[in-house]
């Protein structure tokens, strides 16, 4: 804050708001670049594989420079989870919102989910690896993982409930059970395709979803367009 005209003290000219804004923007860009690099490492090595030293080497920064943006390894891990969740929403959730409510939107959600999963067969899924790493722990990192997964589950469950409200699913259909079975397909796909490298795993997951929908849908709805994922690699 500048001194008043009555002040006899001489002070340095304060940094302009534009200068401060540029410094803040540069800091945010640097942090975003670090998180991006950390996410790349975490998808292959897991969240527990992250270290300030490894990131410093990948980004070409000093360890103190990387540490200054997060303050702790735990905060770095949480930042990676948040970034992964944001990307998941951008690739899976938001594009599906352009589809009409009901089965069309549920199909779009699963379709987008499968497209992302088919890529993650090579790289890995933070939600799945994180569940293994932090399944029997407590703390902020586990809480961040659980919150992200539960947010996605809530979105899928809401889409299923909307199908019921529109009369597109049979009245006895349980949204919780249907969600459980759909999520189970994704988990099985990662295990079969990534770990066992079983040929045809993606097609089996798609068939599984179409079977669930056919079983739960009203007869006229069950004849709708099946999910189809274009992929060149299991």
Image: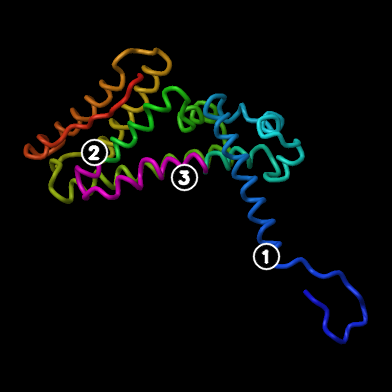
The furthest residue to the bottom: 6
Residue at horizontal 75 percent and vertical 36 percent from the top: 63
Residue 194 position within the rendered picture, expressed as x and y whole percent measured from the top left: 42, 18
- Between the residue at mark 2 and the residue at mark 3, the CA separation in whole angstroms equals 21 Å
Residue at horizontal 40 percent and vertical 12 percent from the top: 196
The disc, 2 or 3, on the residue closer to the chain's N-terminal end is 3
Say which residue label 1 marks: 18
Q: Which residues are magenta?
A: 83-107
**Looking at the image, residue 131 lies above or below residue 3:** above
Is 24 magenta? The answer is: no
> 200 or 195: nearer the eye?
200
Seen in the image, is 55 located left or right of residue 110? right
The furthest residue to the left: 220
Instruction: Indicate which disc residue 86 carries.
Output: 3
Q: For the residues labelled 3 and 1, say whether their Cβ atoms are less than 8 Å apart.
A: no
Secondary element under disc 2, as helix, strand or loop, is helix
Report crowding for label 3: few under 14, some 14 to 19, many 20 or more residues within 10 A (C-alpha). some
The disc, 1 or 2, on the residue closer to the chain's N-terminal end is 1
Instruction: Indicate which disc residue 140 carries.
Output: none
Residue 1 position within the rendered picture, expressed as x and y whole percent measured from the top left: 77, 74
Residue 187 position within the rendered picture, expressed as x and y whole percent measured from the top left: 37, 26
Is 99 magenta? The answer is: yes
Seen in the image, is 227 located left or right of residue 220? right
For the C terminus, give its image quadrant: top left
- Between the residue at mark 3 and the residue at mark 1, the CA separation in whole angstroms equals 29 Å
The disc, 3 or 1, on the residue closer to the chain's N-terminal end is 1
């Amino acid at each position: 804050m500048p001194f008043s005209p009555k002040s006899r003290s001489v002070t340095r000219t304060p940094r302009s708001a534009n200068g401060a804004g540029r410094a803040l923007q540069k800091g945010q860009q640097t942090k975003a670049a670090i998180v991006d690099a950390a996410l790349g490492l975490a998808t292959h090595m897991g969240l527990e594989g992250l270290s300030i030293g490894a990131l410093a080497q990948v980004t070409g920064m000093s360890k103190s420079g990387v540490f200054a943006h997060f303050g702790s390894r735990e905060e770095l891990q949480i930042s990676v989870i948040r970034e992964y969740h944001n990307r998941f929403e951008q690739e899976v959730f938001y594009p599906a919102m352009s589809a009409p409510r009901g089965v069309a939107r549920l199909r779009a959600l699963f379709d987008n989910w499968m497209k992302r999963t088919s890529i993650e067969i090579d790289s890995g899924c933070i939600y799945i690896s994180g569940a293994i790493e932090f399944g029997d722990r407590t703390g902020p990192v586990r809480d961040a993982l659980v919150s992200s997964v539960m947010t996605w589950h809530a979105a899928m469950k809401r889409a299923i409930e909307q199908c019921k409200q529109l009369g597109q699913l049979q009245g006895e259909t349980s949204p919780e059970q249907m969600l459980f079975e759909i999520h189970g397909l994704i988990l099985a796909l990662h295990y079969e395709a990534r770990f066992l490298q079983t040929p045809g795993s993606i097609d089996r997951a798609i068939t599984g979803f179409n079977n669930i929908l056919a079983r739960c849908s009203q007869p006229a709805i069950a004849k709708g367009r099946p999910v189809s994922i274009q992929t060149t690699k299991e």
